[in-house]
Image (cartoon, helix red, strand yellow):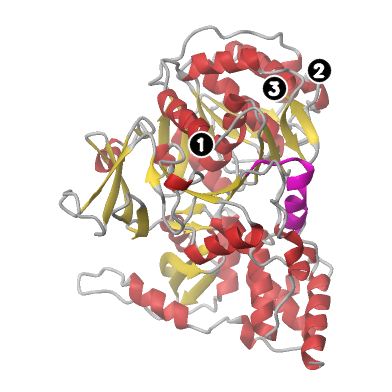
């Protein structure tokens, strides 16, 4: 690492970028480096005219990749602390999260500015873009609508078009907070990680050394931009390496085949995924096996969840490409341990080895354990967070003399490779997305007829873990799981909504009153109540019942002609569950083409009918 800082590296990269080169491509629509830099300059002026000063916090809530990218980069260089939020948060979650961050200004999609969606008294600017549309040469704002919001002020595009560009020449203190990320909890005791510019600079340098990023790279990243993996392996590393970032406007499982075909068309070099997506890829037919066998492609990078060794080996064998596995948390910016891509740091089934940081594995007393013994992983380095925002006690629990306690149990073999053993914390990781169980439990307890509730993870072969809950309801009411799931959907982001809820007469407890979660989990896993395999009726009735179970609604709310893009609850997670449950109910195996082609429920009915006919005909 040189004597550079984040801001001096930014300025040098800015001067080197060819203005006509594509920076971001979303569904074939291009935003050039020139458009990006023009936008950044106008944002500098906007920050200045709205009274924002280095050290202030801003929140960004948008589905637009171009808007988030330029707000993120401009904010970091200006010296602001930027907090991207999940746009799928329910209104109460979003309002609570914004109160927690206490921003000086909020940038938010105009469609999300509804009554009660924002904390009072905080200035906001609406992003009224045609989301993720390309921003080619010329003034970026001219390709945005800039229409007024219902609350009166004009949108960000119109604001910027009226401003002249500005320059930022001051250095930013490396200890200044640059990025703020929710690591868990948006309704209950939120934890917001504070990452300094020094932290970000350290991670960028490691990325450049380990991941082979350069100006020739074409990065395909499907991950959310409010997560570290989406941000750091997205607009941040693209800008600092001079690469081009490719993203779909909105990824769905049905589009996975098109995504894989784009690897050759767009000359992709790096594919950024989570294990859940690799699991879906492993279900695909042989026509996709050569998707990565191009002269440009370098490797797949997987993170955010445990990568099972069998899945890892299957993907490498089938697609004839290296899968690099990394380990990290928001508290380490993004990554700390690397398995690959180079052979000396690669052992399949492991987390690899630490790079640009130190680790130690300790027992309950904080003493190092011997090789091969299990202990808690601790990490120290320039990539370790400053702490949790306004949570000094919680920060003190996990940061000890510069060492970060990860809460994960690992072991280290004689060759120095680290093996994941299990998670000490209660955090649920489903498809690479963090879910705080208490958020879900609180939402269930908000129902007037729920007396007790507890939420936990259940193992799942596709998503690693799924969210499940156990509840006790008032004896005088008839309340089923579908009612409770619908209740949760009104209060929680889709990935937090339980996929399984079981009712209990009472929750088992030990003599001190503590809920015996492990006993409940065993009971729920063995439980067959609500299993779609018990569904009766004709083919259409069964399809509707299965879909209702997966989407958290009633069969009467659906018809065979509903489409995935317009049906609430039919996200990528629900789509995979829909396919798996259909296979279980009808005792068939759907083809990869079936799985990718189902966009309406009548498509699923046809696919099931065809497989049943094949089965009957032998």
Q: Is residue 287 visible?
A: yes
Which region shows up in magenta?
254-270
Q: What x and y, as percent, mark residue 444?
A: 48, 63
Specify whether 601 is left or right of 208. right
Closer to the eye: label 2 or 1: 2
The verdict on residue 268 being magenta is: yes
SS at badge 2: loop
- The residue sitting at 78% across, 25% down in the picture is 146
Residue sitting at 55 percent across and 18 percent down?
10
SS class, disc 3? helix
Residue 400 occupies which quadrant of the picture? top left
Proximity of marks 3 and 1: CB atoms separated by less than 8 Å: no
Q: Which residue is mark 3?
A: 36
Q: Nearer the viewer, mark 3 or mark 1?
A: 3
| Quadrant in the rendering for residue 392 | top left
Q: Nearer the viewer, residue 568 or 449?
A: 568
Using the image, determine if residue 396 lies above or below residue 461. Answer: above
Q: CA distance from mark 2 to mark 1?
A: 34 Å
Residue beneath disc 2:
138
Residue 62 percent across, percent down from the top left: 65, 37
Residue linked to disc 1: 98
């Amino acid at each position: 690492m040189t004597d550079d800082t984040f801001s001096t590296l930014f300025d040098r990269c800015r001067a080197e970028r060819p203005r006509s080169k594509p920076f971001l491509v979303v569904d074939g629509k291009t935003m050039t480096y020139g458009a990006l830099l023009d936008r950044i300059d106008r944002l500098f002026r906007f920050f200045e005219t709205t009274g924002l000063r280095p050290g202030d916090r801003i929140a960004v809530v948008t589905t637009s990749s171009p808007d988030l990218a330029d707000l993120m980069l401009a904010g970091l260089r200006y010296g602001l602390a930027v907090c991207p939020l999940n746009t799928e948060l329910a209104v109460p979650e979003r309002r609570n999260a914004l109160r927690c961050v206490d921003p000086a200004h909020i940038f938010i999609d105009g469609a999300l500015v509804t009554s009660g969606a924002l904390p009072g008294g905080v200035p906001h600017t609406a992003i009224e873009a045609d989301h993720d549309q390309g921003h080619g040469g010329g003034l970026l704002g001219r390709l945005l609508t800039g229409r007024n919001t219902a609350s009166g002020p004009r949108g960000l595009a119109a604001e910027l078009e009226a401003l002249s560009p500005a320059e930022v020449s001051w250095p930013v203190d490396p200890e200044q907070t640059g990025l703020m990320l929710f690591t868990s909890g948006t309704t209950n005791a939120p934890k917001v990680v504070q990452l300094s510019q020094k932290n970000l600079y350290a991670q960028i340098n490691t990325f450049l050394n380990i991941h082979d990023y350069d100006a020739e790279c074409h990065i395909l990243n499907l991950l959310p931009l409010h997560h570290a993996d989406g941000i750091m392996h997205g607009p941040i590393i693209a800008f600092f390496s001079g690469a081009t970032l490719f993203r779909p406007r909105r990824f769905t499982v049905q589009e996975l085949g098109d995504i894989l075909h784009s690897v050759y068309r767009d000359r992709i070099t790096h594919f950024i995924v989570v294990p859940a997506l690799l699991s879906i890829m492993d279900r695909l037919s042989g026509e996709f096996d050569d998707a990565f066998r191009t002269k440009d492609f370098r490797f797949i990078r997987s993170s955010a969840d445990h990568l099972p060794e069998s899945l890892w080996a299957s993907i490498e064998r089938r697609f004839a490409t290296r899968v690099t596995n990394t380990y990290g948390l928001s508290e380490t910016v993004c990554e700390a341990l690397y398995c690959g891509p180079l052979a000396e740091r690669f052992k399949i089934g492991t987390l690899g080895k630490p790079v640009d940081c130190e680790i130690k594995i300790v027992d309950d007393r904080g003493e190092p354990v011997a090789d091969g013994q299990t202990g808690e992983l601790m990490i120290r380095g320039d990539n370790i967070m400053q702490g949790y925002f306004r949570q000094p006690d919680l920060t003190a629990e996990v940061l000890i003399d510069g060492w970060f306690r990860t809460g994960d149990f690992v072991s280290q073999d004689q060759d120095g490779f680290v093996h994941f053993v299990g998670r000490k914390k209660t955090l649920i990781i489903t498809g690479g997305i963090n879910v705080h169980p208490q958020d879900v439990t609180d939402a269930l307890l908000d129902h007037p007829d729920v007396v007790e509730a507890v939420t936990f993870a259940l193992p799942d072969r596709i998503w690693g873990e799924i969210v499940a809950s156990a509840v006790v309801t008032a004896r005088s009411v008839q309340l089923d799981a579908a009612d409770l799931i619908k209740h949760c959907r009104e209060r929680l982001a889709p990935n937090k909504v339980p996929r399984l809820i079981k009712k209990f007469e009472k929750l088992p407890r030990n003599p001190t009153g503590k809920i015996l979660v492990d006993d409940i989990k065993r009971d729920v896993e063995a439980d067959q109540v609500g299993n779609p395999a018990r569904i009766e009726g004709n083919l259409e009735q069964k399809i509707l019942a299965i879909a209702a179970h997966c989407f958290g609604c009633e069969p009467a709310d659906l018809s065979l002609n509903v489409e995935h893009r317009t049906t609430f609850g039919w996200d990528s997670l629900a789509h995979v569950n829909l396919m798996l449950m259909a296979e279980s109910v009808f005792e068939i195996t759907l083809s990869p083409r079936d799985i990718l082609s189902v966009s309406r429920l009548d498509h699923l009915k046809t696919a099931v009918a065809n497989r049943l006919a094949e089965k009957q005909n032998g």
